[in-house]
Amino acid sequence: MKLVNDSDAMWELNMSYLCLAQRLLQSDRAIGMFRLGVSADVAAALAALSVKHMNDLASAGQLICALRPSRHGVISALTRATPPVDIVRLHTALALAGLALPDEAAS
């Protein structure tokens, strides 16, 4: 028995992502853009979304965020046994910073 259907789970994930994105961008736009892996144009669009538009996007039936480390090697490297947590955070930030933004990859 499924407790939550896929549509509800997608809506919840999408809304969580949009709320987090807005909070990160309002707190510090540059750091928010880096953490989200979005361009200035996408950041501006996310920051400007109303609650109604966020709900509409969340209800689209598709995930609106993507797992950035899409290569197996990156995920594998980030999840192996490593030294202290501070080094893990730094390594994660460096690995994600090296990935091209979706808009840049298409260019």
Image (tube, grey):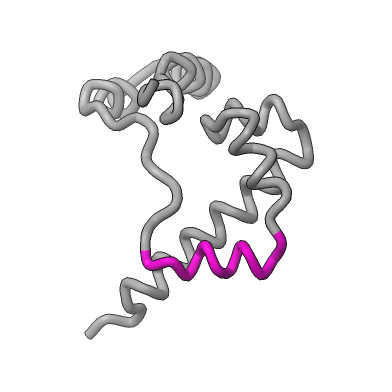
User: Camera-side residue: 72 or 64?
Assistant: 64
Magenta highlight on residue 53: yes
Residue at 69% across, 39% down: 44
* 39 is within the stretch colored magenta: no
The answer to which quarter of the image holds residue 102 is: top left
Quadrant assignment, res 67: top left
Asked whether 63 or 5 is in front, the reply is 63
Q: Quadrant of the C terminus?
A: top left
**Residue extending furthest toward the bottom:** 1
Q: Residue furthest right?
A: 27
Residue 65: x percent and y percent?
44, 47
Q: Residue 106 or 57: which is nearer the viewer?
A: 106
The magenta segment is 50-61
| Residue 23 x %, y % | 71, 47
Residue pictured at 55% horizontal, 35% vertical: 36
Q: Residue 18 location in percent, x, y? A: 59, 54
Does residue 36 sit above or below 71 in this rendering?
A: below
- Dominant SS in magenta: helix
Residue located at (73% from left, 31% from top): 29
Q: Position of residue 62 (x, y in %)?
A: 37, 60
Tell me if 91 is positioned left or right of 16 in this view: left
Quadrant location, the N terminus: bottom left
Q: Residue at x 52, y 16 (%)?
A: 90
